[in-house]
Amino acid sequence: MPSSRRRSKPQGRGRRRTGRRLPPIRTVAALAVLAIAAGVVLYLAWRAARPKPALSIPDAAETVREVAGRHGCPAGRVTAEASRDRRGALVSVTVHAPRGFPAERFTLDLEATAHNLGGRLEPQPLTEKGGYGLTRLEGVVAGTRWRVLVLGEEPPPRAPSRAAGATPKTARLAIVLDDAGPSTEIVPEVERLPLVVAVAVLPNAPHSAEVARALGAQGREVLLHMPMEPVADHGPGPGDGAIEVGLQAGEIRARMERAIKVVAAARGVNNHMGSRATADPTTMRDVMLVLADHGLYFLDSRTTTETVAEWAARASGVPFLRRDVFLDVVSDPDAVHRALEQAIARARAQGSAVAIGHVHPLTIELLAAELPRLAADVKLVRPSQLLH
């Protein structure tokens, strides 16, 4: 007998689906990656198009002024000059150190400052020491070469302005080369220079007397390069027979007389080192008394700003000159060339100037090339021609 119950159909079977089908998960992920990539590209394009901030390049002069100021050196005693040499651009900064300037602490401080700026400055040797040349550092900071010199002297005076249309006066320049005497090989080298270039001979070197005679035979003006006591700088001293502070007047006379006898051709005397001796009034008075007896003039190499040599010379009636420029504090052709230009500028500004260098082959080579090309308004003279 057929059942009276009807079988119910499963729910949902046979019904038409009305909702949309969802995309697969892989498609969603791909779209998300594309969107992120597009966002990154747009961000990078925006960054590239945005103006870039200017790089902060440390200024050599301002950096050195700041460091020197921390050690008691006024900003006005720091000068700077930009130039180019065989190795490219160079910024030279000179610190004209005041009395008591702590050069060693300044050097360490400046080295640390350069390091903090991502650069490096290292101490380098100096030609002229004994009180004048205190320290020298060179290196690269922020891609720029720096040379920093610390000198024990006053900043150079400003040249007076020349009136428009004024006829330039002839400037007189005297050049003295120090430290002759250790070798006779320097005699033919110096012969390449004009005869008015003078040479100062050490009295305590192996060939002092022979070199002095040979230079005098050339017709060249010879000076006695008298060793004198420097302020202690942990370097080589002035050598035997030097004039030292505290010596009795009789011993100073004896040492001076021996030196004058060795460099018998000398017309004048200048000091080798001597930053301590030339600052002592009693010592310099005793030296000048000997020079007065021999009719010799004194050229102060000015290895210290505390020198009393001019006072002592005038008090004793000794003719006096003073050094204006050292030519080869840095033994480098471009540095010597710039120093020669500074000496010429001093001569033009003052009417005359004295430049001191050394009998180094590099210095002689440069002078032999440059002195014949001096401008018409600059006359090269013997030191004695500048005496009043």
Image: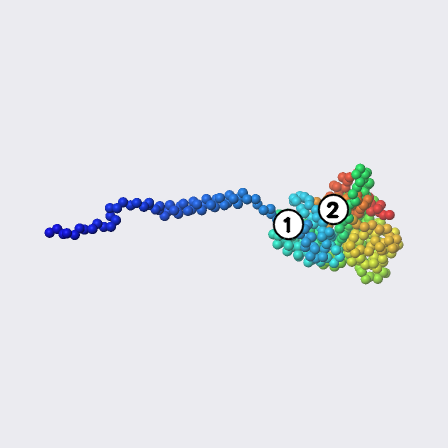
The residue sitting at 75% across, 50% down in the picture is 155
Q: Judge whether 135 appears above or below 219 on screen.
A: below
Q: Which residue is mark 1?
A: 58
SS for tag 1?
A: loop
Q: Which mark is residue 262?
A: none
Which residue is nearer to you in this view: 319 or 262?
319
Label 2: few (<14), some or many (≥20) within 10 Å? Answer: many
Q: Tell me if I can see residue 207 in this picture.
A: no
Q: Which residue is mark 2?
A: 339
Q: Tell me if I can see residue 370 in this picture.
A: yes
- Disc 1 residue type? Pro
Q: Judge whether 328 appears above or below 240 on screen.
A: above
Q: Give the spatial CA distance, label 2 vs label 1.
A: 26 Å
The residue sitting at 79% across, 56% down in the picture is 306
Instruction: Give x and y (percent) for residue 219.
Output: 83, 44
Tell me the colour scheme of the image.
Answer: rainbow
Which residue is nearer to you in this view: 383 or 213?
383
Label 1: few (<14), some or many (≥20) within 10 Å? Answer: some
Chain-order first, disc 2 or disc 1: 1
SS for tag 2?
A: helix
**Residue furthest top as drawn:** 165
**Residue furthest left as drawn:** 1
Instruction: Give x and y (percent) for residue 68.
Output: 69, 55
The residue sitting at 61% across, 54% down in the picture is 116
Instruction: Give x and y (percent) for residue 263.
Output: 82, 52
Closer to the eye: label 2 or 1 = 1
Which image quarter: residue 82? Answer: top right
Which residue is nearer to you in this view: 145 or 267?
145
Which residue is nearer to you in this view: 55 or 242?
55
Q: Is residue 86 left or right of residue 160?
A: left
- Disc 2 residue type? Ala
Q: Is residue 228 left or right of residue 36?
A: right
